[in-house]
Image: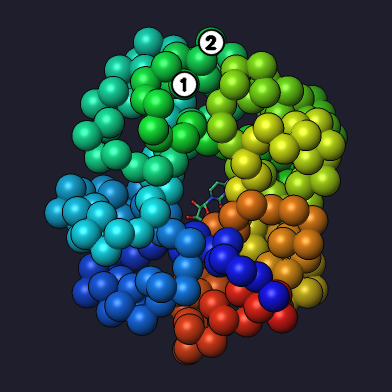
Amino acid sequence: MLTKSKIIVALDSNDLSKIKKLLNKISKKIYGVKVGYEFFYNFNKKGYDFLKKKNLKIFLDLKLHDIPNTVNKGLKALNYLKPDMITVHISGGEKMLKEAKKVSKKTKIIGVSVLTSLENNDLKKFYNIDNSKKLVSKMTKVALKSKIDGIVCSPKEIKIVKKISKKKLKIITPGIRLKNNNISKDDQKRIMQPKEAIKLGANYLVIGRPILNAKDPMKIINLINEEKI
Ligand code: C5P
């Protein structure tokens, strides 16, 4: 039984009233919310302030990826939002990550490793590497060297990240699906069930569609919190 929820709900929707209704039901049973492209670009500061007023922890997933100076200035411009965590791509390199880390003492910098939608096939094309664990291992080392606070990876890579980072990085995993068939019908590929990801040591699970599209989101959240699914 979990003492505290590890769920970060990805608010990927263009319907603010639907999100407000959902949050009225589930806010107390989750760790926080993920504000990504869809929420932030649709609702901007107004939507963001609603979440802040609800006292929710905010994982601002804008995945910055540019040259070090541009990322530093971009993050400075976002500082007024005071998110609890903000994401940048680890593939932006060590210098970029260090510049990101300089910006705020309060907001945790979380590095995105290999997107959970990519398969080994894709990695071969882009990086001449045939498996995600190898690439995520390299990225974990860069994240550690840059002294950022956490890493986003697939649950399939939790073990290797834990081994390398020795608890110095918070591990955040999207790619969560409720069925144990190892096949996702949508864009997520490197997937796992919530209870397995928690058992392996994920600090937080980012979950969108399995909660947003559920008939009874509260039921799903309770089952995840109780490590039953
Ligand atoms: O709906 P679903 O559960 O697939 O949502 C997962 C969320 O996690 C999405 O908002 C996606 O942007 C985010 N994410 C991801 N893979 C990463 C980083 C973030 O799926 N590597």
Residue 74: image location, x then y, percent:
31, 24
Does dot 1 land on a helix, a strand or a loop? helix
* Type of amino acid at the residue the image marks with label 2: Lys
Q: Choose top left, top right, bottom left or bottom right for residue 147.
A: top right
Q: Residues within 10 Å of mark 2 (few under 14, many from 20)?
A: some
Answer above or below: position of 161 versus 97.
below
Find disc 2 in the rendering and name its residue: 95
Neighbor class of circle 1 (other Cα within 10 Å; few <14, some 14-19, many 20+) is many
Residue 211 to residue 119: above or below: below
Assess whether mark 2 and mark 1 are in contact (beta carbons under 8 angstroms): no
Q: Is residue 211 visible?
A: yes
Task: Please state if 27 lies on the left or on the right of 153 as rendered.
Answer: left
Q: Is mark 2 within 8 Å of ligand 1?
A: no
Pick the front one: 95 or 180: 95
Q: Secondary structure at mark 2?
A: helix
Look at the image and tell me in which quarter the C terminus lies.
bottom right
Q: Earlier in the sequence, mark 1 or mark 2?
A: 2
- Scheme of image coloration: rainbow
- Relative height, residue 139 to residue 48 (above, below): above
What is the CA distance from the residue labelled 1 to the residue labelled 2? Answer: 10 Å
Q: In x, y percent, where is residue 215?
A: 47, 89
Which residue shows up at 65% across the image and 45% down it?
A: 171
Marker disc for residue 101: 1
Kindly tell me whether mark 1's CB lies below 8 Å from ligand 1.
no
The residue located at (28%, 49%) in the rendering is 40
Q: Residue at x 44, y 41 (%)?
A: 85
Q: Amino acid at mark 1?
A: Lys
Residue 116 position, x and y percent, is: 64, 49
